[in-house]
Amino acid sequence: MFNVVGQAMSSATIAFQQEWSYYLVGLQLLYNPWRSINGGHHSNNTQGSHPPPLQLNIQLHPEEHAGRPPTTHFLHWRANSGYRRPDGVRKYVFLINDQFPGPTVEVRSGDTVTISVDNELEDEGLSIHWHGLHMRNANLMDGVAGVTQCDILPAASFVYNFTISADQSGTFWYHAHSSTQRADGLYGGFVVHKPFSRPTSRSAGSSDAAASEAFKHGYEKDVLLLIGDWYHRQARDVLSWYMRAGSFGNEPVPDSLVINGIGHFDCSNAVPARPVDCIDSSNFSHRPYLYLDPRIAYRVRVINTGSLAGFTLRFARETLQLIHLDGGIPVELQPDQNDVASAGILFPGQRMDFVLRRREIHSMQHSKDPSSSLTVELDRSYPNPALTPRQIFPIIITANVDNRRKAPETTTNTTNNKNKYRQVDIDISRVPSASSVLALLPAKAHETHVVYTKIEKLSRNHNVPYGFINRTCWRPQRDPPRPLIGLPR
């Protein structure tokens, strides 16, 4: 049984604690940085019998948001479902407006967002959580089923209405927060652009760029990557297997991974005991790919939309400079960490932003193959015969390498680039926050409160592996259904 389903990282145990809030997986694969996302449609396959498209890039548009005054966005979402082949394997997935992943939302700090959600699922309630956003004075909008609201019942609607804090910007996302729907695709990106003041006169034009994030960090394009693990079985079936004594508490290892809704799976890896309807997309020439113009630098926003596995990203001919973690929190790097090839481990729910630049750009015009690649390596402790934990995706160079303008500046000059290039990971768990963040903390606390917590996975309730905090396990009230925030205190 364990060879069929796999086993996985013990660090994710607590995520499977409450059956109403577990989402085992959910992700998506590579893309093409040139498509609007604010309610736009990703060109992924809508038929269950054809392989996915080869590229699917999400390009963001800070220029449409960062320089305008705050406004209100009205969005209408239909939560529905259908069959897709994210990685070549046919699966029943959850959709928003028939899209997987859901529409990417782009706003600026101070904007108000009003989203009407219609539940068109046949027999499941749902709620939408806005991961990482401050819900100041708006607890009821946080979207946690059983805590801040009841499920949106089938054929019912709910309106989420909240204002983005004026001091909050960065990379966030939304996802289902009831049952296991997130693991089957009900999620999407939510990007809050940092505003800047437009110049009041033509002579002040330079201040426009000086105040922008792009000018500060030296990039010209802004793109989004939603990366995560993927199960070929329905997440509710995977959870059902786990929540029994026979699993021995070994979390099920995923079968694949996807970036922005697309992946590639080698059909020959499918386990005979669990056959799949598979169209092989593992050939390197048919894999999803990322387009890059080597003449410019990119801000790449990465979100781990999975439920279990962390991952590390590596680039073959590019360097990355980490600038933010978990939303808009700036980080402070050592000089030798500014131009490296990889970063990780990024665990589910976490985000990182980095500036991606082409390395050795001047030698490209003499190269027969200027293309590059992105490697996504899943962090896992137990095997799954179906899973290829280290997957490589091509990076296609879009511009003519000849007659190019000057390459973007980096923190290391061209002469020393070869020596400065590092084939090591940035361990994001050890990267400190920037001094500007630490300066906001008080020098001395008025009071100190110490809270002791103990998180365990215990074989109680007929040896079913539930998670416990301080020997306590909680379930939402079901009869009658009422969220925790609405119970008498």
Image: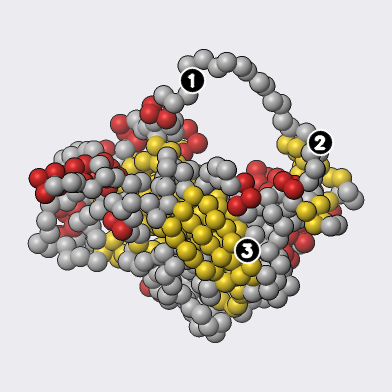
| Lateral position of residue 72 relative to residue 90, left or right | left
**Amino acid marked by disc 2:** Arg
Front-most of 15 and 488?
488
The residue lying at 47 percent from left, 48 percent from top is: 164
Residue that numbered label 3 is attached to: 158
The residue lying at 49 percent from left, 65 percent from top is: 75
Q: CB atoms at circles 3 and 1 under 8 Å apart?
A: no
Question: Gap in Å between the C-alphas at discs 1 and 2?
Answer: 34 Å
Residue that numbered label 1 is attached to: 442
Residue that numbered label 2 is attached to: 471
At which x and y percent is residue 156? 67, 70
**Amino acid marked by disc 3:** Phe
Query: Which comes before the other along the chain, label 2 or label 3?
Result: 3
**Amino acid marked by disc 1:** Pro
Above or below 366: residue 166 = above
| Lateral position of residue 221 relative to residue 484, left or right | left
